[in-house]
Image: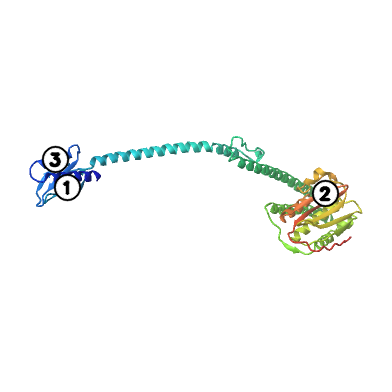
């Protein structure tokens, strides 16, 4: 359009200079003005519609842009039409557009290929790490991931995964040991049941003899039932079960009730039980009774004859401790961390497999975890103290120390 406006000024100037519309002078000047510009057409028309001048024609199939204006020669108006053929410009623009599209597509392909290559190179350590993880099996959890070739961003992840593998390996070993122990503990009464049953069936027996056999069988079945129940309880605790919370006004009262249940066994062992201290807390009373029952039963089995078993209740910093203390054989220090493992026995002197299946202290540890507490175990100079703590965020009330001897 700028070209047409420039040409308009030139044509208007030529018409004004000519001063007349007839003659060939204006025509020659107009011919000279369009020379060198192909695709330009000029048409001059008088006021009555007569064509005064027309340059060479533009092909009909060409696209043109037109500019109409009026010029004067003295007093006579002249209508002028300038036409510019822009077909060649359109073709140039079309070729440029195709070139730009092709360049854009080629650039996109190059960028995509380059990006894909860079991503593949960047993900190679991740694929190596994934291959290491996929190669892990239940029996190869001890093999830690190799993070030496990993970028700095993945080093913390590799460290966390290795820590997880260590915990999984430890848990798997404990599970394998637990399965083996359970199989052993259940196999013994089952073998006894099958053996005694086979003996009883070999010959005829009277009713009293069969009653004795059935009574022995019932004891073994009750023992297996206790093992199964304890295993189910530990399984629930391992899955993250939490203890109910209720106000316990007197832990000494809870301990006295548990001691009453063990009165016969305590008298049979020739022992006395003393409860020292008292406190209030928020806990599950039934679970605390079960934990104390296991602790008192454990102390009763291993305390020296005619000694005193102490149930100590202390309020510590933000928690309440319940411990059962007895005089007996000193437990070696290296065994103390394992006392709360399932089926663990420190030595033959402290194992009574006929009556104790080795899950009592494991249940105490589970009850402590269910309350968010911990277990405590000390043994020195023939005095063994085993118990648990229960977190209690409330301020302690005035203790009511009392001593009960049985």
Nearer the observer: mark 1 or 3; the answer is 3
Q: Which residue is at the far top?
A: 149
Give the residue at mark 1. Answer: 81
Taking 325 as reference, is 119 above or below it?
above
Quarter occupied by the C terminus: bottom right
SS category of the residue bearing label 3:
helix
Q: How is the image coloured?
A: rainbow
Q: CA distance from mark 2 to mark 1?
A: 115 Å
Nearer the observer: mark 2 or 1; the answer is 1
Taking 124 as reference, is 402 above or below it?
below
Residue 378's tag is: 2
Q: Nearer the viewer, residue 287 or 266?
A: 287
Q: Which residue is at the far right?
A: 306
Q: Nearer the viewer, residue 352 or 169?
A: 169
Query: Residue 195: horizontal and vertical position, in percent?
Result: 79, 47
Give the residue at mark 3. Answer: 29
Q: In terms of sequence position, does the residue under pointer 1 or pointer 3 come before the other?
A: 3
Query: Residue 227: horizontal and vertical position, in percent?
Result: 75, 52
Taking 121 as reference, is 387 above or below it?
below
Q: In terms of sequence position, does the residue under pointer 2 or pointer 1 come before the other?
A: 1
């Amino acid at each position: 359009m700028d070209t047409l406006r420039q040409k308009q000024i030139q044509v208007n100037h030529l018409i004004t200079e000519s001063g007349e519309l007839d003659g060939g002078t204006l025509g020659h000047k107009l011919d000279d003005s369009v020379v060198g510009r192909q695709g330009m057409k000029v048409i001059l028309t008088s006021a009555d519609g007569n064509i005064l001048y027309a340059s060479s024609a533009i092909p009909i199939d060409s696209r043109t842009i037109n500019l109409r204006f009026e010029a004067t020669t003295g007093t006579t108006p002249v209508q002028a039409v300038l036409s510019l053929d822009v077909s060649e410009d359109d073709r140039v623009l079309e070729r440029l557009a195709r070139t730009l599209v092709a360049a854009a597509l080629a650039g996109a392909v190059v960028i995509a290929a380059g990006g894909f290559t860079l991503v593949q190179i960047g993900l190679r350590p991740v694929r190596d790490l994934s291959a290491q993880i996929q190669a892990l099996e239940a029996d190869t959890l001890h093999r830690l991931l190799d993070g030496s070739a990993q970028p700095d961003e993945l080093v913390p992840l590799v460290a966390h995964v290795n820590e997880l593998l260590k915990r999984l390996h430890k848990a798997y070993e404990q599970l394998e040991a637990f399965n083996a122990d359970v199989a052993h503990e259940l196999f013994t009464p089952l073998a006894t049941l099958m053996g005694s049953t086979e003996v009883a069936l070999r010959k005829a027996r009277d009713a009293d003899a069969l009653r004795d056999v059935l009574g022995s069988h019932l004891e073994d079945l009750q023992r297996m039932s206790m093992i199964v129940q304890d295993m189910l309880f530990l399984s629930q605790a391992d899955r993250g079960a939490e203890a109910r919370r209720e106000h316990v006004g007197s832990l000494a009262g809870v301990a006295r009730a548990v001691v009453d249940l063990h009165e016969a066994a305590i008298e049979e062992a020739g022992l006395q039980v003393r409860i020292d201290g008292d406190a209030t807390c928020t806990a599950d009373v039934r679970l605390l009774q079960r934990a104390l029952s296991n602790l008192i039963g454990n102390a009763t089995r291993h305390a020296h004859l005619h000694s005193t078993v102490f149930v100590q209740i202390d309020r510590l910093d933000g928690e309440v401790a319940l411990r059962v203390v007895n005089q007996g054989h000193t437990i070696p220090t290296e065994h103390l961390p394992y006392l709360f493992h399932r089926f663990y026995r420190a030595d033959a002197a402290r194992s009574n497999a006929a009556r104790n299946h080795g899950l009592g202290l494991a249940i105490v540890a589970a009850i402590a975890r269910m309350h968010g507490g911990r277990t405590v175990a000390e043994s020195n100079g023939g005095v063994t103290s085993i118990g648990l703590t229960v977190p209690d965020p409330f301020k302690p009330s005035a203790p009511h120390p009392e001593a009960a001897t049985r």
